[in-house]
Amino acid sequence: MSNRIPRIKVCGVTVQEDLDVLAEFEVDSVGLNFVPISKRKVAPDQAGILAKRAHELGLSVVGVFMNQSPSDVARVLAHVSCDFVQLHGDERPEDFVDCKAPIIKAISWSGRSEETDLASSWANASNLRAFLLDAYAPAEGGGTGRQARWDLLVPRPKVFGTTPVILAGGITSENVAQAVSMVRPDGVDTASGVESAPGRKARSLVQAFAAAARKGWEGQ
């Protein structure tokens, strides 16, 4: 298991062959989605197989949840080896102090005061490892392809302090270099931006996305 913050993360993988593609093009992290309403959700048994293969390939594994109880998250973690837990809802830090994996807290960033309040509530959580900033999509949580408000992240809001920031929300191979140059995130995350269909990743898009992301950082 790895404690490295995801730098290039592809979320919503559902089949083993896509993991090989991610590893081939030096993506470092994969997101496995356990949100019941997600088009990319995987059952814990299948996720356990995917996580094992991901670790064999050197990929870190992020388990993605949204407004699920700590006990539900714990049951998944008992079967699936996750390096991080990504929480995509209104979860409170005090409810996850005993979480068995470090946390990436996903927050939409659209200028609403509720977003700042949520970030502030998590800012000093001992098990927080990164914020993931996404587009505002209260029903779906993420993976919508909508672009986050990059303009509201420049300069980086003080509420995030020194906590690493991962940028998500409508990032594709065509705009990831610009996103990295403009926002200067510590990592980037995509799902629909590299897909041929929900849960299936396109080899050419993964290759282009990873290369463009690295190019964006090299230009800084």
Image (cartoon, rainbow, N blue to C red):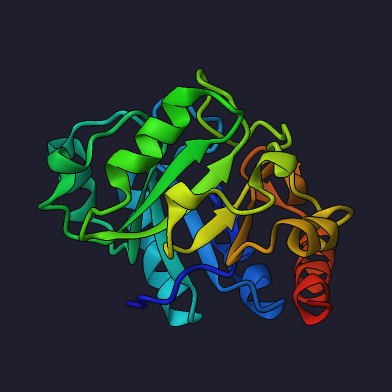
170 in relation to 90, above or below: below
Q: Residue furthest right?
A: 174
Q: How many marks?
A: 0
Vertical order, 148 against 220 (above or below): above
Of 27 and 220, nearer the camera is 220
Q: Is residue 26 left or right of residue 54?
A: right
Q: Where in the figure is residue 43, as x and y percent of width and height?
A: 36, 41
Left/right of residue 73 with respect to residue 142 in the rendered view:
left
- Residue 39 in the image: x percent, y percent? 56, 30
**24 and 167: which is toward the camera:** 167
Q: Nearer the viewer, residue 37 or 179?
A: 179
Residue at the spot 39% in from the left edge and 64% down from the top edge: 51
What residue do we see at 30% from left, 45% from top? 122
- The structure residue drawn at horizontal position 35% and vertical position 75%, both measured from the top left corner, is 3
Q: Position of residue 48 (x, y in %)?
A: 33, 58
Q: Quadrant location of the N terminus? A: bottom left
Q: Is residue 3 left or right of residue 157?
A: left
User: x, y percentage for residue 118?
Assistant: 36, 34
Q: Is residue 87 above or below residue 6?
A: above
Residue 16 lies in what quarter of the image?
bottom right
Say which quadrant the C terminus sits in: bottom right
Q: Is residue 99 visible?
A: yes
- Between 110 and 102, the one lying in front of the other is 110
Residue 65 in sight from this viewpoint: no
